[in-house]
Each structure stands twice: as structure tokens, then as C-alpha cells.
């Protein structure tokens, strides 16, 4: 089952789809107490709509982020073997973690803002894990799947000049507004099956930049959920961005970075497609 939020910004409604084309309004189930950020709640929603006709055409509505606001976004750096190779870096002994603010998350097709002073705005197709049950100090990676609600697409947009050349931590280049297009949907874990056999693809203006598989991940989904739970409590509605494969703009020489007018399309098998245009920042009230 696929969970989405559709409608104008700030006025989205919750829906589910079984085919990715038509959807069912699930607000009555949520009003009755089914929390869509939990595994138990999503199961209640599934039961509630089992015999309901899908009457919302997803091609005719704006698709927002399937999470109104994640609790937190935990990101994993350098988690694909070929990406480490293109960066000229050693395979990490443990996952590299950093955070993105929940406010960076937005709809999969909304515009992405190139921040003022940006020199190296970059793209990163990533498999996102959505947590659906509290995970704290898990005993082993075998316990991880019991805490995964589902999966989605993240574009972990980054500004490399801010991230790598301005001192301090990576957070500087990761937390600009709109820097995490998310969705179009959360596919429940049972629908995806094996998350280590998913194809990833990203294009810029139709040019293929990233094409890989989650099979190339250094630390798999089970390991990441277990590992992160040793350092912070994962709660329903939290997101883990699991890293990006080779082909990022900073991996080319010279770099291939983004500017206003560029259109990025991102897809992962079973998780749909994003399409977002990059635009320049305009200060509120400018020119008034």
C-alpha cells in the first residue's frame, strides 16, 4: 500500500493508493484513531479501505510530502561503494551520520530553492527509511524490520561549497530550505520486500547522472536502523536517508552543479518518481 498526502500546500489530505494512479481518502480512518506514522495505524487504515473504490486521480492533484513534518531526518554519508570510490575516500568502518532539519522536507515535485551565495548546489538520489515503531538500543540488526513502516524517495539536495569549504560540520550544506524533496509516497515495507534490490536513477535536464542499485550500499537497511538506535531513539515518523550512489555533481571534473532552471527527475523502483525544478531565492517583499 502507498500512503500519500495530496492537495494545495498546507491543505493536503491523507490518501492511500494500491496502484500509484488512483487513491482513496483515508481521513475517516485517521479521525477514528489510526495514526499513519505507525505500523499499527497503517494496518488499521489498510483494513478500513479494503473494500473502498479509489476515486481520486493522482494525475490531477498536487502531491505533497507523505509526512507533514518528520520528527527528525537522520542521514548517512558515503554509504555506496562506488560513491566512495568516485570521492577518493576509504570505505567507512562505521556509518557516517548527520542530520537535516524536518523543515527541509517538501513535496516531490515542488520547486527547490538555490540559496543565496550558492556555488555548488548538488543532487543525491536516496532510499529513505520511514520509522513506524519506537526503536531504542536494538539488540541486533535482525530486529530492525519490526520498526520500519516503509520506504520513500529522498533527494538529499546539498550545497557542497557550504558543506565542505566553509568549515565546521556537513550540516551547513544540508539544511537550506526545500533541500529534501520527499515522496511521492511511502510504500509500506510489505510492498517493497527486499530493500537491497532496488534500482535508483536521477537525471538532470534529461541527462542520466546517477544509476545504481541499493545492492551497492555499504551498510544495509537492517544495519542502519540497528546502528542509529544505539545513539538516538528512533520514533514513528522519523526518516533515515540511507546515502547516495555514484554520479553526484561533485563527482565530476569539473563539477556539474545545479542552477535556476535545471529540472531533476528522481526514481526508485516501486517508489515512484519525483520531478522538481530549481529556482533562485527571492526575498519576501523584494520589489514591492
Image (cartoon, rainbow, N blue to C red):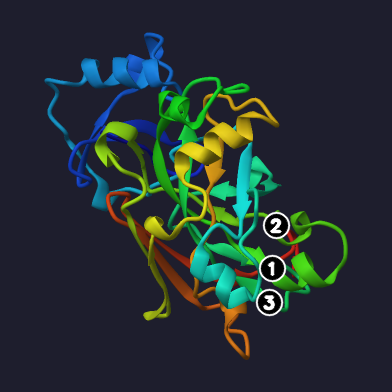
3D distance between C-alphas at marks 1 and 2 = 8 Å
User: Which residue lies at the image location 72% right of the left edge and 79% below the top edge?
Assistant: 119
Please give left or right for residue 87 compared with residue 143 in the image: right
3D distance between C-alphas at marks 3 and 2 = 13 Å
Viewer-nearest of discs 1 and 2: 1
Which percent across, then down, holds residue 165?
Answer: 82, 72
Label 3, residues with CA under 10 Å away: few <14, some 14-19, many ≥20: many
First-in-chain label (1 vs 3): 3
Please name the residue that numbered disc 2 is placed on: 176
User: Which structural element holds mark 3?
Assistant: loop
Does residue 247 sit above or below 170 in this rendering? below
Q: Which mark is residue 120?
A: 3
Could you tell me if the residues under marks 1 and 2 are in contact, i.e. CB atoms within 8 Å? yes
User: Which structural element holds mark 2?
Assistant: loop
Asked whether the viewer can see residue 202, the reply is no
User: Which residue lies at the image location 56% right of the left edge and 74% below the top edge?
Assistant: 85
Could you tell me if the residues under marks 1 and 3 are in contact, i.e. CB atoms within 8 Å? yes
Figure disc tally? 3
Could you tell me if the residues under marks 3 and 2 are in contact, i.e. CB atoms within 8 Å? no
Quarter of the image with the N terminus in it: top left
User: Which residue lies at the image location 51% right of the left edge and 39% below the top edge?
Assistant: 223
Please give left or right for residue 255 compared with residue 175 in the image: left
Please give left or right for residue 41 compared with residue 74 in the image: left
Residue farthest bottom in this picture: 254
Please name the residue that numbered disc 1 is placed on: 159
Snapshot quadrant of residue 13: top left
Snapshot quadrant of residue 211: bottom left
First-in-chain label (1 vs 2): 1
Viewer-nearest of discs 3 and 2: 3
Amino acid at each position: 500500500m502507498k500512503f500519500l498526502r495530496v492537495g494545495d500546500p498546507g491543505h493536503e489530505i491523507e490518501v492511500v493508493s494500491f496502484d500509484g494512479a488512483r487513491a482513496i481518502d483515508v481521513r475517516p480512518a485517521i479521525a477514528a484513531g489510526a495514526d499513519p506514522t505507525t505500523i499499527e495505524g497503517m494496518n488499521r487504515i489498510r483494513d478500513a479501505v479494503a473494500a473502498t473504490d479509489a476515486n481520486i486521480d493522482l494525475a490531477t492533484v498536487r502531491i505533497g510530502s507523505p509526512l507533514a513534518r518528520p520528527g527528525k531526518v537522520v542521514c548517512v554519508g558515503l554509504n555506496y561503494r562506488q560513491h566512495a570510490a568516485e570521492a577518493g575516500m576509504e570505505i567507512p568502518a562505521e556509518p557516517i551520520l548527520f542530520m537535516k532539519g524536518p523543515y527541509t522536507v517538501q513535496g516531490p515535485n515542488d520547486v527547490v530553492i538555490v540559496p543565496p551565495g550558492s556555488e555548488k548546489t548538488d543532487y543525491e538520489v536516496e532510499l529513505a527509511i520511514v520509522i513506524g515503531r519506537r526503536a531504542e538500543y536494538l539488540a541486533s540488526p535482525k530486529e530492525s524490520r519490526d520498526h520500519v513502516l516503509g520506504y520513500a524517495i529522498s533527494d538529499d539536495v546539498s550545497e557542497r561549497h557550504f558543506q565542505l569549504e566553509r568549515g565546521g560540520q556537513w550540516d551547513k550544506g544540508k539544511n537550506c530550505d526545500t533541500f529534501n524533496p520527499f515522496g511521492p509516497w511511502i510504500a509500506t515495507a510489505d510492498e517493497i520486500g527486499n530493500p537491497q534490490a532496488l534500482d535508483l536513477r536521477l537525471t538532470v535536464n534529461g541527462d542520466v547522472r546517477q544509476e545504481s542499485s541499493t545492492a551497492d550500499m555499504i551498510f544495509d537497511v537492517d544495519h542502519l536502523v540497528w546502528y542509529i538506535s544505539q545513539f538516538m531513539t528512533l520514533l514513528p515518523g522519523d526518516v533515515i536517508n540511507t546515502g547516495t550512489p555514484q554520479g553526484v555533481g561533485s563527482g565530476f571534473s569539473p563539477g556539474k552543479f545545479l542552477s535556476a532552471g535545471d529540472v531533476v527527475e528522481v526514481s526508485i523502483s516501486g517508489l515512484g518518481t519525483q520531478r522538481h525544478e530549481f529556482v533562485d531565492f527571492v526575498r519576501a517583499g523584494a520589489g514591492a
